[in-house]
Image (spheres, helix red, strand yellow):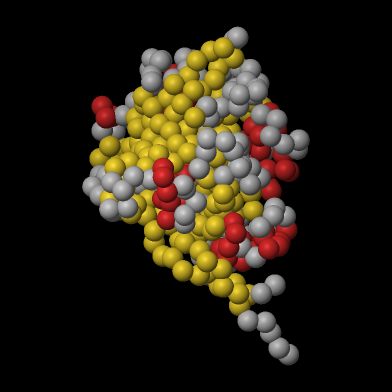
Amino acid sequence: MSFKQQIKIPATYMRGGTSKGVFFNLLDLPATAQVPGPARDALLMRVIGSPDIYGKQIDGMGGATSSTSKTVILSPCTQPDHDVDYLFGQVSIDKAFVDWSGNCGNLSSAVGAFAISSGLVDPSRIPNDGMAIVRIWQANINKTIVAHIPMVNGQVQETGDFQLDGVTFAAAEIKLEFINPSATDADMFPTGNLVDQLEVPFVGGISTLDVTMINAGIPTMFLRAQDLGYTGTELQTDINTDQAALSKLETIRAYGGVRMGLFKHIDDAKTRQHTPKIAFVAPAKSYTSSSGSMVSADKVDLLVRAMSMGQLHHAMMGTAAVAIGTAAAIPNTLVNIATGGNRLTQVTFGHPSGTLTVGAEAHQDNGKWQATKVTMSRSARVLMEGWVRVPDA
């Protein structure tokens, strides 16, 4: 029996924020994968090494976590006053699907640099030295992201002294602006309420939980840590080694997703793992982060722990940070209440790896809340570039 040789596809492996992913220029993909559909999904899953019944992604570029099972496709811009189109695919680790339902805020920090290095940004817009302003069209959610990319001698500056909790080594700071991150044609709070009572059936009866459901950055559900039996200081091992807790949180996410109108039946959550996100909040208190450093209560406004693809995230998803900053700026959400009830235009929250500061602007128009802009700093760098190889299907 004869077998076909592997095919080579130009690709770049990049860290963006606290995530890693494989980046492609759309025009470098095989013709069948240059359009949405099963061929594209199959290719990206094979690149990452999914579905993997062992949950390790040994035969691919994935790292067997939600933060490292990611793909990005960039293409020439289709929108006026933008520089590049950015499409994000969250690849399931053990199941055969790619979730296109949302953005990755962490990898957004690597998009501008990749776009510049790939020649997707008009050279006239790139300074030899200084700051390149890259206007990104986020094609999953039809939103604008503005990335501020430092340039030195005509090259993207990747090294620096900016330290991002959740990333071991320092790098150059990249400032991101998420423009109008909430839905402009609908209420940012899908039910119209700042806090809802969500009924979730568990073994032994129905639990009613207070929840803030918001669509800013990414659809997100916020609950009180104490209502789940937590303190808000939990680290990954406290949650991810507890199968009963993971099952409970996933059940809450499924019922919340139906309540938010993201899918019709709770079973649909099995094939939409990327959205909605579920997070729990608590008032500020001191704790020891996963790196062993102390996070002091007087250095944060609140604590937040968030789930990603069924596991507690080791730091914080960038899109969830957008939701946190926005909700903190709006009085009477559970996030705002956890901060002490002040209306904040900037919030610093504690997560398992340390802290993150997010700026947010929100306003009420005809009784409906809208987010105007959310800002944060991340970092990014190229880890490897060349070709990724996959068996010819």
Residue 199, how many percent across, how many down? 66, 27
**375 left or right, relative to 189:** left
**23 left or right, relative to 357:** right
- Foreground: 172 or 323? 172
- Residue 86: tell me if it is visible: yes
Residue placed at 55% from the left, 24% from the top?
212
**340 left or right, relative to 296:** right
Residue 202, how many percent across, how many down? 66, 36
Quarter-wise, where is residue 286 in the image? top left
Residue placed at 28% from the left, 50% from the top?
152
- Foreground: 36 or 246? 36
Residue 261, how many percent across, how many down? 70, 30
Residue furthest toward the bottom?
A: 1
Residue 23, placed above or below residue 202: below
**Quadrant where the N terminus lies?**
bottom right
Quarter-wise, where is residue 390 in the image? bottom right
Residue placed at 33% from the left, 37% from the top?
355
Residue 95, how many percent across, how many down? 66, 58
Residue furthest toward the front?
A: 124
- Foreground: 182 or 128? 128
Residue furthest toward the right?
A: 264
How many marks are shown on the rendered structure?
0
**Quadrant where the C terminus lies?**
bottom right
Residue furthest toward the top?
A: 366
Residue 83, placed above or below residue 336: below
Residue placed at 38% from the left, 35% from the top?
376
- Residue 157: tell me if it is visible: no
